[in-house]
Structures are given as C-alpha cells and as structure tokens.
C-alpha cells in the first residue's frame, strides 16, 4: 500500500468511479479521509461502489448519469456539491474501448468512444467548474497510452484520448487564474481491469505486455490512485497542465511495440475465423 497523504474532510468527485481504475482512485481518496461522490451509468454499479466506499470508512454518495448527457452530468455534480460543498478534487475517468481495425469499425462505434472519452470529459469539467474550490481545486483527467502511442485497432481511442490530453493543457491555461490545477494521468497496463482483459486476453499476450514494461510487471489500481493523491496534494501545488504516465516505463517504447504485436495477432485470428 502506498503511503497515504491526508485528505480528511476534503470533497472528491470521481466520474466513472464505480469500477476498475476509477473505483481504485475513489477508494484511495476514501482511505485518505475524503468524502467521496461517484458517478457512472449503472445504478447497480453506483450502489455497489458507494457500499465499498462506506465500508472503507468514508462518507460517500453516488449518482447514476451518463457523461454523454450534459444535463444529467451537471445534475449529478450539483447533487454532490449540495451534500459536500466545493470540490477539492475532481477526477474525470469515464472511458469506452473495444479493439477493432478502422475498416472494421462503424462510424457510430468510433463516435461512441469519442463521445464517452472526449466529449464526456469536456462535459464533466465544464459542468463542474462552478462547483470547484477556487483557489485550490485539483482536476485530473484519466487518459491512456493511446493518447501518445499509435496502436493498431485503437484509432478511436487514440484520437479521443489525445484530445483529452490537449483539453487538459488548454483548460490548465484558462482556469489557472482561478487557482484550479488540471493534469492528466496515463495509466499503463493495470492488472485486473476490463481494459487489459480486452487488449491482452490470453496468457501469451499478458506475458508479452509484462516483458515490455521496464519495471517487469503490470501495475495495480493503487499505483494510479497514489499518483492522483500526489497530484492533488500540496506537494504538487505548482504542477498544472502535466501529462503523467504511471506505467512502469511502458511508454518509453514497449507500449506501441507490444500492443502492435497483440493487434496483429488479433487481426490474424479474426481473419482466420472468417475464412
């Protein structure tokens, strides 16, 4: 367990915070003393996440809303603000993904991922601005390696997450005068997540990913959660507009290479199944 930075009494909102890495982030803040609100599309996942947060000792609440729906997103943020006051930390982590070559992807499939990842991030940040502590708020967008490393079968995610990182940089410039810091975190291969299950579904693919990480292992959700707490603490008080990989060095060269091989294997398997 990473060393804890105290967030006692702080208000934290995590969009997409009901599963995977984002739930891990929410739990990390909860264990550090924060009051935590989460939001995602599934009422069942929201209820389960709130129960886990409360079991971790946190004051917690949740709302079911789709980040693609601005009005619903705004209402969820307002409900949390009514309960907890100005947000000290906002994490925008909703994401969608499926592996497919560009020619095997419908226009609607491409649009769906861009709407969740990029438009959804804009909705969360734009709707949250009136509810952020000024000065002092930390905003963190959860990006992805595809934002920087071109990967076959990931054209939609590459485009969307690159947009998210540029949104981070632009809003860091625009909102800095309000005393709001905005950064992106890029998780590398994180074990026991839906994303890695889709992108490295076989033992062979998993082993290839692990070998391509300089630190020699996949990460865990707490690795990302700890980075978010660090960026939201006074220790990072002069950091804004940064894009931070939390990936064991994977982005230094292993990401594109290993995922390229995995993509080729997947495309070959799909072609064989068709033929």
Image: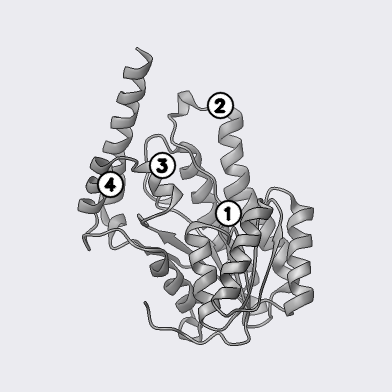
Q: Element type at marker 4? A: helix
Mark 4 near mark 3, Cβ–Cβ under 8 Å?
Answer: no
- Camera-side residue of 178 and 218: 218
- Please state the horizontal and vertical placement of residue 248, each as a whole percent of the image: 29, 63
Residue at image coords 37%, 35%:
152
Q: What distance separates the C-alpha of mark 1 from that of mark 3?
A: 17 Å
Residue on which disc 1 sits: 94
Please say if 86 is above or below 242: below
Residue on which disc 2 sits: 106
Label 1 crowd (10 A; few <14 / some 14-19 / many >=20): many
- Please state the horizontal and vertical placement of residue 58, each as a whole percent of the image: 60, 79
Q: Element type at marker 3? A: helix
Please say if 220 is above or below 259: below
- Camera-side residue of 2 and 247: 2
- Please state the horizontal and vertical placement of residue 18, each as a whole percent of the image: 58, 59
| Quarter of the rendering containing residue 26 | bottom right
Q: Mark 4 or mark 1, which is nearer to you?
A: 4
The tag earlier along the polypeptide, 4 or 3, is: 3
The tag earlier along the polypeptide, 2 or 1, is: 1
Residue on which disc 3 sits: 198
Residue at image coords 25%, 50%:
254
The tag earlier along the polypeptide, 1 or 3, is: 1
Which quadrant holds the C terminus?
A: top left
The tag earlier along the polypeptide, 4 or 2, is: 2
| Quarter of the rendering containing residue 49 | bottom right
Q: What distance separates the C-alpha of mark 2 from that of mark 1?
A: 21 Å
- Camera-side residue of 147 and 264: 264
Q: Which mark is residue 206?
A: 4
């Amino acid at each position: 367990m990473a060393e804890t930075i105290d967030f006692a009494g702080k208000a934290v909102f995590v969009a997409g915070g009901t599963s995977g890495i984002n739930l891990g982030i929410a739990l990390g803040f909860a264990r550090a003393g924060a009051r935590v609100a989460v939001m995602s599309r599934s009422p069942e996942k929201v209820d389960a996440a709130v129960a886990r947060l409360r079991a971790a000792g946190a004051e917690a609440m949740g709302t079911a809303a789709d980040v693609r729906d601005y009005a619903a997103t705004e209402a969820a943020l307002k409900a949390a603000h009514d309960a907890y006051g100005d947000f000290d930390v906002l994490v925008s982590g909703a994401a969608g993904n499926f592996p497919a070559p560009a020619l095997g992807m419908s226009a609607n499939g491409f649009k769906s991922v861009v709407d969740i990842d990029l438009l959804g991030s804009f909705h969360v940040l734009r709707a949250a601005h009136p509810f952020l502590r000024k000065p002092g708020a930390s905003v963190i967008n959860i990006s992805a390696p595809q934002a920087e490393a071109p990967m076959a079968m990931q054209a939609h995610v590459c485009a969307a997450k690159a947009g998210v990182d540029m949104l981070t940089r632009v809003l860091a410039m625009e909102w800095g005068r309000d005393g709001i810091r905005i950064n992106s975190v890029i998780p590398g291969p994180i074990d026991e997540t839906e994303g890695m299950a889709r992108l490295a579904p076989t033992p062979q693919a998993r082993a290839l990913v692990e070998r391509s990480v300089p630190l020699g292992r996949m990460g865990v959700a707490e690795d990302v959660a700890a980075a978010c707490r660090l960026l939201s603490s006074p220790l990072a008080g002069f950091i804004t507009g940064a894009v931070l990989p939390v990936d064991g060095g994977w982005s230094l060269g292993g990401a594109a290479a290993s995922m390229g091989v995995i993509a080729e294997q997947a495309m070959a398997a799909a072609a064989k199944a068709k033929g």
